[in-house]
Amino acid sequence: MVSDVHGAGGLPFECTRCSACCRHEPGLVLLSREDLRRLLGRLGLDFGAFYAKYCRLVPLGGGVAISLRETKEYDCIFWKSGCTVYDARPVQCRTYPFWPGIVDSRTDWIREGRRCPGIGRGPIRNRSEIEEALWEYRRNSPILLDPGTDPEHLDENTILGS
Ligand code: SF4
Ligand code: SF4
């Protein structure tokens, strides 16, 4: 629950499509099961082929999670003059900047505004829209695997829980 949306009843945000959140800096785009299913369907790939081309394992909370790869310039692997999987982009990308830790306090929101020029401009996003994004973000927690997971032996059914 956003406590008071910083006393304004909402937060101004309008994406400028600057692509700063997709490029130039090292970062993680962690996949949930729903993200993975959506991307596999969008690209028509099985998990093994998708993982080999687009993913890597990264440490997370005592285990490992599946993140999208980056190019050597630190661009997201799916960025090519724009997001090439925009309609199937992960929840992390869909809900930004309405994440816990960014909207929780005015200080955090202003700090994130130094990274994202869309923060603080444009129309006010109302409380229910922000709450919905937060709910979507929390509902799609990253897939968490055992720390010793061998990327060569990842099993699609296990990963997708099917
Ligand atoms: S950094 Fe902000 S303004 Fe730029 S593309 Fe990402 S969400 Fe949009
Ligand atoms: S999946 Fe698309 S929106 Fe998300 S970081 Fe990559 S290029 Fe950006």
Image (cartoon, helix red, strand yellow):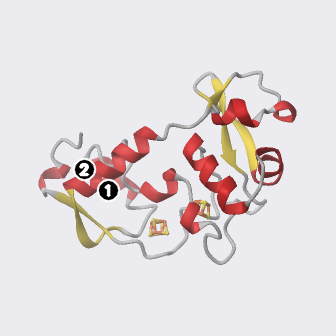
**Amino acid type, residue under disc 1 in the picture:** Ile
Q: Amino acid at mark 2?
A: Arg
Q: Nearer the viewer, residue 53 or 111?
A: 53
SS for dot 2? helix
- Residue 154: x and y in percent read 79, 33
Q: Nearer the viewer, residue 96 or 36?
A: 36
- Quarter of the picture containing the N terminus is top left
Q: Residue at x 62, y 66 (%)?
A: 85
- Regarding residue 72, the answer to whether it shows in the image is yes
| 78 left or right of 151 in image | left
Q: Residue at x 36, y 53 (%)?
A: 98
* Residue 84 or residue 59, whichever sits in front: 84
Query: Which residue matches tag 2?
Result: 106
Q: Is residue 136 above or below residue 156?
A: below
- Determine whether 43 is above or below 159 in the image: below
Q: Position of residue 90 (x, y in %)?
A: 55, 54
**Relative to 161, is 98 above or below?**
below
Tell me whether the residue at label 1 lies in contact with that at label 2, contact meaning CB atoms closer than 8 angstroms: yes
Q: Measured from the top left, where is residue 145 in percent x and y?
A: 67, 27
SS under mark 1: helix
- Judge: label 2 CB < 8 Å from ligand 1: no
**The image quadrant in which ligand 2 is located:** bottom right
* Neighbours of disc 1 within 10 Å: few (<14), some (14-19), many (20+): some
Tell me if 121 is positioned left or right of 19 in this view. left
Percent of width and height locating residue 104: 29, 43
Vertical side of 156 occupied by 94: above or below: below
Q: Which mark is residue 110?
A: 1
Report which quarter residue 60 is drawn in.
top right
> Is disc 1's CB within 8 Å of ligand 1?
no
Using residue 124 as the reference point, say whether residue 151 is left or right of it: right
Residue at 66%, 61% in the rendered image? 42
